[in-house]
Image (spheres, grey):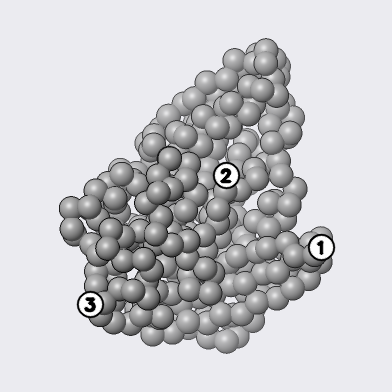
């Protein structure tokens, strides 16, 4: 960004209803911090948004919901980009930086059904919809008798398919439903013991061009240190596993009494195998804790699960 902090700031965002909510939330926070600044949105369509007839894992590649936004940064069409952290690859290209992680919403998964209160209540053979191999791996591990089927589309589309009777239940992110004013659709906030959350779930991040000190200064006040620490640990797990948000990898960090508790797992999509472990350590060792935990998962068999995908 070449303008001064009091001039303008353009925010690249996906066009989905949830992404637009997130971008507007960042816009409002920045406007409060910089009243004289003109802050606008640059809505874009990403490859992940356009291809909805296949599971994300089948499309291939990392950053399916980022590349077009990053291109807008490089061309000068936008100054910053707002992302759901669960969509951000573990390692960014050198042209970019992600200096700000905002305080997160709920990191947990939501069990949504019109007839049943929890996964445990589903009858054998019930059809459960999800777009996530991570969710499928864990839920099939706990309930191998379920018919877990692929479900793509935005939140409204997925809920519509549930209401039309195509599924007995679906799994979405609690944070997304809460942000869209649909928290009443949550039948159960699933505990991490049943479904460990996605890396960075419920958290928003702001990406900029590397070295753009003006943009970095403009957004710095929005960074939440505790959330940044948690997400750093989770993303370190993913980086060591060479994973993406489309693989059956989960990691969940919590701050407890000044310490960082980190849980992670890797599962086969059919639920036949699940490798899980956890660790605790000082917050200033977040990345190292994540890397070490990933090493233990690999040694326990996660390498074979990932190699088979």
Q: Which residue is drawn at 57% across and 44% down?
A: 204
Mark 3 or mark 1: whose residue is earlier in sequence: 3
For marks 3 and 1, give the CA distance: 44 Å
Give the residue at mark 3. 125
Q: Residues within 10 Å of mark 1 (few under 14, many from 20)?
A: few
Which residue position holds label 1? 258
Q: Which quadrant of the figure contains the N terminus?
A: top right
Asked which secondary structure carries label 1, the reply is loop
- Labels 3 and 1 touching (C-beta < 8 A): no
Q: Give the spatial CA distance, label 3 vs label 2.
A: 36 Å
Q: Residue at x 52, y 68 (%)?
A: 191
Say what secondary structure mark 2 lies in.
strand
Residue 80's place in the image compared with 265, above or below, is above
- In this view, the mark in front (1 or 2): 1
Residue shown at 31% from the left, 66% from the top:
116
Residue 204: assigned label: 2
Q: Position of residue 15 (x, y in %)?
A: 39, 34
């Amino acid at each position: 960004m070449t303008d001064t902090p009091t001039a303008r700031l353009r925010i690249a965002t996906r066009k989905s209803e949830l992404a637009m909510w997130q971008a507007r939330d960042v816009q409002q926070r920045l406007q409060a911090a910089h009243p004289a600044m003109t802050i606008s949105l640059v809505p874009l369509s990403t490859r992940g948004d356009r291809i909805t007839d296949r599971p994300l894992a089948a499309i291939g590649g990392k950053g399916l919901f980022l590349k077009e936004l990053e291109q807008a940064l490089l061309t000068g069409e936008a100054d910053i980009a707002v992302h759901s952290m669960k969509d951000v690859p573990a390692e960014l290209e050198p042209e970019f930086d992600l200096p700000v992680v905002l305080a997160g919403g709920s990191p947990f998964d939501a069990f949504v059904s019109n007839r049943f209160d929890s996964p445990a209540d589903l009858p054998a053979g019930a059809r459960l919809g999800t777009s996530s191999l991570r969710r499928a791996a864990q839920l099939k591990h706990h309930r191998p008798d379920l018919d877990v089927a692929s479900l793509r589309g935005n939140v409204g589309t997925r809920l519509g398919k549930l209401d039309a009777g195509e599924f007995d239940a679906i799994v979405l992110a609690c944070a997304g439903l809460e942000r869209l004013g649909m928290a009443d659709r949550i039948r159960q906030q699933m505990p991490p013991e049943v479904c460990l959350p996605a890396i960075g779930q419920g958290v928003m991040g702001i990406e900029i061009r590397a070295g753009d000190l003006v943009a970095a200064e403009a957004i710095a006040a929005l960074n939440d240190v505790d959330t940044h620490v948690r997400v750093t640990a989770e993303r370190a797990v993913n980086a060591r596993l060479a994973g993406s948000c489309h693989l059956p990898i989960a990691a969940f960090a919590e701050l407890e009494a000044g310490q960082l508790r980190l849980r992670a797992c890797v599962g086969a999509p059919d639920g036949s195998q699940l490798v899980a472990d956890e660790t605790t350590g000082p917050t200033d060792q977040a990345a190292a804790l994540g890397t070490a935990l990933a090493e233990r998962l690999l040694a326990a068999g996660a390498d074979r699960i990932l190699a088979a995908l």
